Amino acid sequence: MTIWFSLIRYNLLSPEDTGFVGLQNYQFMWSDPAFLPAVFNTLLLTVAVLVISVVGGVLLAVLYDQPFMGRGIARLLVIAPFFVMPTVSALIWKNMLLHPVYGLIAAATTALGLPPIDWLGEYPMLSIIIIVSWQWLPFAFLILLTAIQSLDQEQKEAAQIDGAGPIAMFFYIVLPHLKRAIGVVVMIETIFLLSIFAEIYTTTAGGPGTATTTLSYLIYQLGLQQFDVGMASTGGILAVILANIVSVFLVRMLANNLKGENER
C-alpha cells in the first residue's frame, strides 16, 4: 500500500484531487529543499552516535571490568539511561540540563563566570547527538562488557608474563577480541538510529529550519502535519531504500569479520 500511495496524488486535505502520477512524487521529493539536508542529518546523527557509543562503550567496558568497590552499583548506574523512555530522556535534557536559564549546565557555566549557552538553539544537532548518545551508550557498554568478560584470563596472564603493558594488551588482545561484539553493536544500533524521532520531536521539532530534520521527522511532517499521504509514502520508500543500503554494507562488514574469525 505504501508503494501504491507513493505513486498517486493523495492529500487528505483534498481527497477529491487524486490520480496516478507515477514517479512524479519522487521527483518532487528529490527537489524538496528539505530532503537532502534530512538525508545528511540522518547519516550524521547515525555515524556520530555510533562513534560515541562504540568508543565510549569500549572504554567503559574496560574500566568496569576492573575490580573496585561498588562496581555492581556503578554498572547499574551506567546501564540505567538505556531504560529511560526516549521522550522522557529528551525532556530531562531539554528542561533540566540544556536549558539556558535554569538548566544545570547553565548554572555551572554561570558559576564559572561564563555566559550560558542556548544549546538547542545554537548547537541543535550537537544537542540531539548528545541526547541520543547518552541513551544508547549503555547498550553498547552492556554488550561489550559481556564480551570482555568472556576473554580468556589465561591469555591475559600470559601476555602480562611476556611483559605486555596495559596499552599493548588493549590493542593486541582486548580490542581484537571485541571486534565481533562491536560489529553486532554497530548493526543493531544503526537499525534504530535511522528512525530516531521522539528526541527530535520533543526538543527541536526539526529546527531551527532543517538543522535537525531527519528522514523520519520529514516523513512525519509530510504525513501528519501537511496530510500529504503520497509524499509521506514516497519519503518512507526512500527511507527504506537508504536503510537497506546501510544494512547491506554493515551485514557484509560483519560477515567478513566473522569469516575472518572463523578462519583463524
Image (spheres, rainbow, N blue to C red):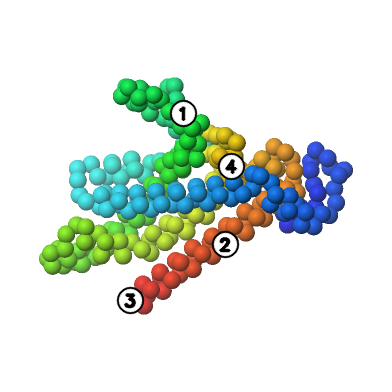
Q: What is the spatial separation of the Cα atoms under label 1 and label 3, in whole angstroms?
A: 52 Å
Give the alpha-carbon distance from disc 4 to disc 3, as whole Å: 44 Å
The Cα atoms of the two marked residues, 4 and 2, are separated by 20 Å
Residue 133, position as x, y percentages in the image: 43, 44
The answer to which of marks 3 and 2 sits earlier in the sequence is: 2
Q: Which residue is mark 3?
A: 264
Q: Mark 2 is on which residue type?
A: Ile
Q: Amino acid at mark 4?
A: Thr
**Could you say where residue 250 lies in the image, as x and y percent from the top left?**
49, 63
Q: Which mark is residue 118?
A: 1
The residue lying toward the viewer, choosing from 114 and 73, is: 114
Q: Earlier in the sequence, mark 1 or mark 4?
A: 1
In the image, what residue type sits under mark 3? Answer: Arg
Name the N-terminal-most of marks 4 and 3: 4
Q: Are marks 4 and 3 in contact (CB under 8 Å)?
A: no
Counting other residues with Cα less than 10 Å from the Cα at mark 2, is it few (<14), some (14-19), or many (20 or more)? few
| Circle 1/circle 3 CB separation < 8 Å | no
Q: Write the residue at 38% across / 53% down.
A: 54
Dividing the picture into quarters, in which one does residue 170 lie?
bottom left
Answer yes or no: is residue 145 visible.
yes
Disc 3 on helix, strand or loop?
loop
Q: Which one is earlier in the sequence, the residue at label 4 or at label 2? A: 4
Whether residue 263 sits left or right of residue 242 in the image: it is: left
